[in-house]
Amino acid sequence: MGRAKKVVLAYSGGVDTSVCIPYLKKEYEVDEVIAFAADLGQGDELDKIQKKAISAGATQSIVGNLVKPFIEDFAFPAIRANGLYQGKYPLSTALARPLIAQRLVEIARELNADGVAHGCTGKGNDQVRFDVTIGALAPDLKLLTPAREWGMSREETIVYGEKYGIAAPVSKQTPYSIDLNLLGRSIEAGPLEDPFAMPDESVFGITSSVSNAPDEPEDIEISFDSGNPVAINGNQLDPVSVVKKANSLAGKHGFGRLDIIEDRVVGIKSREIYETPGLLLLIRAHQEIESLTLPSDLLSTKFELERKWADLIYQGFWFSPLKEALDGFINHSQTNVNGVVRIRLHKGNASVVGRKSTTNSLYIPDMATYGNQDKFHHKSAKGFIYIWGLPSRVWSLVNKTKN
Ligand code: ARG
């Protein structure tokens, strides 16, 4: 493919991506490195990160606020899909990667770059998500992945950086590897590598411990319109505000912590701690309003497809024909998903304590009641069960005569 002349690098301000800048220029003979840092609501000081890229040798340093598309175009579809990888992890990190990669490709096009680059290592999922997305959106662009190839230890990387004026990270730094955005916090490595070791309270950043959570429960109401959470406690909120509000309510009550063993794309089992208060709360409420408004066959088929959808997102296939087709199914299913879910937040729990839908509830009190006002035709049950149970009776009759 020949060398790339102008490359857009996904930049976080950390040691690895900072070292990528001089490394790309020296070892890959790239003429110009353009750094791109994404604001995903992680609360970083992005102006400092922007300057850091320039002092590391970037020709241009771009910061993009992606919070709105992140929530509207990535988080909301994930809520509609009840996206939980392996039934547990709500994909808070995974959802950000296709968006960053998409923006990287757009910037490359705008600036006439012939390559893009990232600083992911060869053990994680993020490299998969970046590579697969970039390949899907721009198969012609050169993809440079120095951190996967340089074979330097962390110490060697720091020493390399220092030669180019990249300051070593402050020593009192956390032993954990942390990824943060508006959807949550992912924490791994350090003492957590022992899967039996209990996470120290210092691991957590955006949720209360059960002991610090309020003693009194708090009941909240989340309203859905076509499967999208649109209001909390009756206040209409835009998507970004819904997520922020859900984060603060659930986080305050200590809901949304996960401690799991997860299967990475590259075949490694890893121990992960997550704090995803708002996202988990919204998915739980969404599942509940679906159970009231969708018929059983649609619910069970959607449930099977949700698992597939989450696998695709985890594994890097946000932009793929199967994901698009599943979105078609999921979005179509959401037209009738309207109503309100009441949730009690208390000491690490978010328990559903009520649900209603004035327009789409399939719960018919006259049918469900055990009282005497009911409209159910009891006698018809007999004929229905005669036919429903026919295969069981046939099986028994045939196999009993054999013995
Ligand atoms: N295992 C999660 C994922 O693949 C999160 C990884 C986050 N990275 C981190 N440095 N903690 O989506």
Image (cartoon, rainbow, N blue to C red):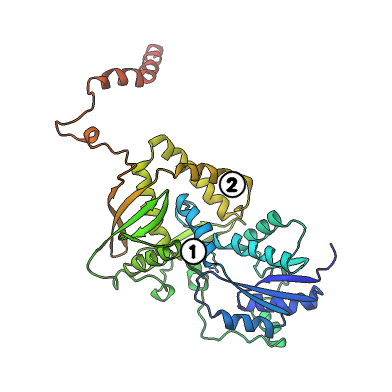
- Please state if 26 lies on the left or on the right of 99 as rendered: right
The residue type indicated by label 2 comes to Glu
Residue farthest along the left direction in this orientation? 372
Residue 92 shows in this picture: no
- Quarter of the picture holding the N terminus: bottom right
Ligand 1 is found in the corner quadrant, namely bottom right
Whole-percent x, y for residue 292 in the image? 33, 43
The residue type indicated by label 1 comes to Glu
- Please state if 25 lies on the left or on the right of 86 as rendered: right
The residue under the point 29% across, 70% down is 213
The residue under the point 45% across, 64% down is 240
- Residue picked out by circle 1: 272
Q: Is mark 1 within 8 Å of ligand 1?
A: yes
Tell me the CA gap for discs 2 and 1. 29 Å
- Residue picked out by circle 2: 324
Dot 2, crowdedness within 10 Å: few (<14), some or many (≥20)?
Answer: some
Whole-percent x, y for residue 160 in the image? 71, 82
Q: Secondary structure at mark 1?
A: strand
- Quarter of the picture holding the C terminus: top left
The residue under the point 29% across, 17% down is 383
Which of the 4 quarters of the picture holds residue 23? bottom right
Foreground residue among 78 and 203:
78
